[in-house]
Amino acid sequence: MTASVQQLLETFDRLSEPERLEAAAEILRRSSEPECSPLDDETLNRIAEESFREYDRREAASAQG
């Protein structure tokens, strides 16, 4: 993951829940526009893996207190 993507995600994590939903919706909207090329299987798998790792991290943090 590049430093700029990592910084974006860290900033995203600091947003409130409504802001995260708004940002995610906007990213999805922009990603579906014609000028974006379709994601290949490798990229989709990487996104899924990173999403699950983040989910697991949040679950573990939530369980600790």
Image: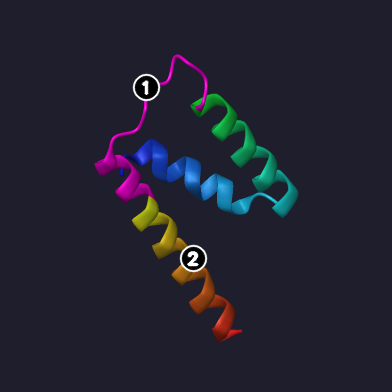
Relative to 20, say whether 65 is above or below.
Answer: below
Question: Residue 58 lies in magenta, yes or no?
Answer: no
The tag on residue 37 is 1
Q: Secondary structure at mark 1?
A: loop
The tag on residue 8 is none
The tag on residue 55 is 2
Tell which of 32 and 5 is nearer to you. 32
How packed is label 2: few (under 14 Cα within 10 Å), some, or many (20 or more)? few
The amino acid type found where label 1 is placed reads Ser
Residue with the most extreme bottom position? 64
Q: Are marks 1 and 2 in contact (CB under 8 Å)?
A: no
Q: Position of residue 26 (x, y in %)?
A: 62, 32
Extent of the magenta region: 32-47
Q: Position of residue 56 (x, y in %)?
A: 45, 71
Q: Position of residue 1 (x, y in %)?
A: 31, 44
Tell me how far mark 1 sits from mark 2, CA to CA: 27 Å
The quarter of the picture where the C terminus appears is bottom right
Tell which of 59 and 33 is nearer to you. 33
Relative to 36, say whether 16 is above or below.
Answer: below
Q: Secondary structure at mark 2?
A: helix
